[in-house]
Amino acid sequence: MEFKHEAIFCIVNSGYSEMVMDAAKKLGARGGTVINALGTASKDAESFFHITITPEKEIVMILVPTKIKDAVLHALYKEVGLETAGQGIAFSVPVDSVVGLSEGAPTSPTEKATDKAEK
């Protein structure tokens, strides 16, 4: 199965979501969604990673074309990674179908097969 989009999730300290979006937009991301959250890391995690855990977090969800996913993740690591004040982590998950994008109709492996059969 070929995926055309990836969902990137970036969890950062509160106040750093704008930096996340700026870094992603420079590489072609069009927008994202920010969710306010609370971290639950323990004091043991703080001493192990040698960082201060800020409980107030922001989760930034960004839908990007698969072809730019690695570049966006790398940019997020540089701009808001664990060694920065943002103390962020980012990961991506494949998205098998999308609706609502202005670039075209919904796509999924099933719809592609149906479209080809109809033509």
Image (spheres, rainbow, N blue to C red):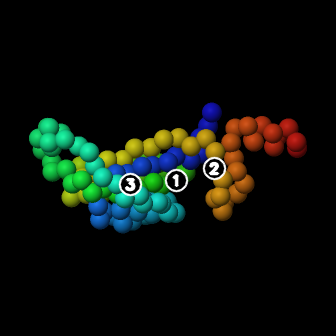
Of marks 2 and 3, the one in the foreground: 3
Is the C-beta separation of discs 2 and 1 under 8 Å?
yes
Residue at 24% x, 53% y: name it: 55
Disc 2: which residue = 98
The mark nearer the N terminus, 2 or 3, is 3
Relative to residue 37, is residue 95 depicted above or below?
above
Query: Residue at label 1?
Result: 63
Quarter of the image where one finds residue 109: top right
Q: Residue at x 27, y 57 (%)?
A: 56
Residue 27, image x and y in percent? 45, 59
Q: How many numbered discs sit on the rendered protein?
A: 3
Look at the numbered discs 3 and 1 and tell me whether their residues touch, using CB distance below 8 Å: no
- In the rendered image, residue 106, in percent from the top left (x then y), is placed at 70, 51
Q: Image quarter for residue 57?
A: bottom left
- Disc ID at residue 23: none
**Tag 2's secondary structure?**
loop
Rate crowding at label 2 as few (under 14), some (14 to 19) or many (20 or more) other CA atoms within 10 Å: some
Name the secondary structure under disc 3: strand
Q: CA distance from mark 2 to mark 3?
A: 20 Å
- At a point 52% along the width and 63% down the height, the residue shown is 30
**Looking at this rendering, what residue extends furthest in the right direction?**
119
Amino acid tagged 2: Val
Dot placed on the residue nearer the N-terminal end, 2 or 1: 1
Image coordinates for residue 58, horizontal then vertical, percent: 35, 57
How far separated are the C-alphas under marks 3 and 1?
13 Å
Q: For the N terminus, which image quadrant?
A: top right
Q: Amino acid at mark 3?
A: Ile
Q: Quadrant of the C terminus?
A: top right
Q: Which amino acid, mark 1?
A: Leu
What residue is pinned by disc 3?
A: 59
